[in-house]
Amino acid sequence: MRRALIATGTTAAGVVLLLGLKPHHSDVTGVSSSSSAPRSSAPGTAGGSSAGSSGTPGTSGTSGASGGSSAKTSGTFKGDVIDTKYGPVQVEITATGGRLTAVRVLQTPSENGRDREIAGFSVPQLTKEALAAGNAHIDSVSGATYTSEGYIRSLQSALDAARA
């Protein structure tokens, strides 16, 4: 009888602690940064790099988005703000003669130190891949899936704006 009471009490305490944990999310969606350096990224989420706006994990290969540098347009184009599970992601591109020449990160999730740490290693990799590919057909960064997916979607919207 005593063991049953201890087991029940321990289980109840464990459930209360688990339910009391606050999920990581960002309430701020319109914050922008003028710095070209990334502010942060999603915490170690093995299912998506700054994924799409819904934060759905699983697309850790190349992006299904089309397009790239087929236009003969030059200028600077902002991508859409993509709301991920951990906060907004937005990029801005520079195109010259229809080729992607620069990518600047305007927003990344930055609610805590882990977000900033993940952005610090994932955003430079994503930018390097985007410039090499010249389009949004790039791989997500392992451990930063939500951030990667948000980056890819924002990049694609900027590329679409450059083509329009």
Image (cartoon, rainbow, N blue to C red):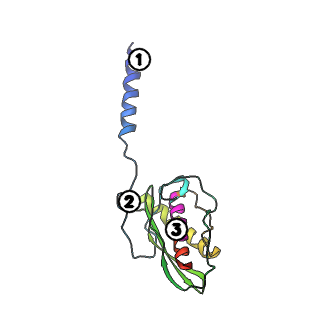
As helix, strand or loop, the secondary structure at mark 2 comes to loop
Could you tell me the amino acid type at mark 2? Glu
Count of numbered circles in the view: 3
Mark 2 → mark 3, Cα distance in angstroms: 16 Å
Q: Nearer the viewer, mark 1 or mark 2?
A: 2
Q: Taking 30 as reference, is 9 above or below it?
A: above
Q: Nearer the viewer, mark 3 or mark 1?
A: 3
As helix, strand or loop, the secondary structure at mark 1 comes to helix
**How far from the left and from the top, in percent, is residue 142?**
58, 57
Q: Which mark is residue 123?
A: 3
Of pointers 1 and 2, the one earlier in the residue sequence: 1
Q: Which mark is residue 115?
A: none
Could you tell me the amino acid type at mark 3? Val
Magenta stretch contains residue 153: yes
* Mark 1 vs 2: CB contact within 8 A: no
Of residues 33 and 55, the one nearer the viewer is: 55
Q: Taking 76 as reference, is 137 above or below it?
A: above
Q: Taking 18 as reference, is 113 above or below it?
A: below
Residue at the disc numbered 2: 111
As helix, strand or loop, the secondary structure at mark 3 comes to helix
Determine if residue 97 is in view: yes
Could you tell me the amino acid type at mark 1? Ala
Residue at the disc numbered 1: 4
Q: Residue at x 51, y 57 (%)?
A: 146
Q: Is residue 146 left or right of residue 7?
A: right
